[in-house]
Amino acid sequence: MRTPSRSSLVIVLAVLATASALAQRGGFRTSQSYSGNVPYDGKFVFVRISYPWYGGRLAPWAHDYPRGEQHFTRILSELTAVPTHTEASSIMSLSDPEIFRNPLIYMAEPGTWSMNDEEVKNLRNYLLKGGFMILDDDRYNQWGNIDLQVSRVFPEGRWVELDGTNQVFHTFFEVDHPETVPQYYDPPPPHFLAMFEDNNPKKRMLILCNYSTDISEFWEWSDTNFKPIEENNWAYKVGINEFIYGIIH
């Protein structure tokens, strides 16, 4: 498949810089789903997963919301053939049966993620029935909780660290050396860990964890000069590859 050139991404990023911002939902504190979610119509919707949070600041799962998904879905729509909702996204809890209508769910900052037993059961069923989960914005010192929560879903599961030979890095863009993908603020290198059906890397990937890296931070601020365009582009390339994988598998 011919992939867009670097200049294609630069042009789209320039468009994002002049686009008006959409209204934000603010002050998230607890796990829930929202009445403003996108009604199902077959088009791809960016689904952000919430989880309980009772701290004194913005809930970690809402990190980079809504600018991250606003910018990302516009890039996805511009560069791929995926019919995508670009003017709205959804927020759901893991107990919400609506997650089963979506091929892919996304969670930010799972380092403080927790689940009740109903959510554990629902997530396992969702993943085994064909769903795909991306864990992003994972701090380098929070692996213990991420592994703990996933082990509740798949007690038998084993993580596999991916290298540039894995198909997820070649679904749309060619990312031969994911270990060199720029970091926003974590110590390099980034790590990409996955859990597969039956613990077999030749079968379908169920969960992909962008560990010790934060590609959505690049998405959120890609219409500014906080980071070089080339670094923003790499974050979009990795993200598009991961989302395309989840959509088509």
Image (spheres, helix red, strand yellow):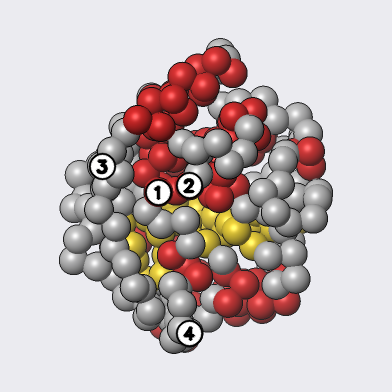
Q: Check disc 2 and give the amino acid type.
A: Glu
Q: Check disc 4 and give the amino acid type.
A: Gly
* SS category of the residue bearing label 4: loop
The quadrant in which residue 96 appears is bottom left
- Which comes before the other along the chain, label 2 or label 1? 1
Q: Check disc 1 and give the amino acid type.
A: Arg
> In this view of the protein, which residue sits in the foreground, 19 or 178?
19
**Labelled disc at residue 67:** 1
**Labelled disc at residue 220:** 2
Residue at the image point whose x is 63% and y is 32% from the top: 228
Is the Cβ of the residue at disc 2 closer than 8 Å to that at disc 1? yes
Residue at the image point whose x is 47% and y is 67% from the top: 61
Q: Name the residue under label 3.
A: 87
- Which comes before the other along the chain, label 4 or label 3? 4
- Which comes before the other along the chain, label 2 or label 3? 3
Q: Name the residue under label 4.
A: 55
Q: Distance between the residues labelled 2 and 1?
A: 5 Å
Q: Check disc 3 and give the amino acid type.
A: Glu
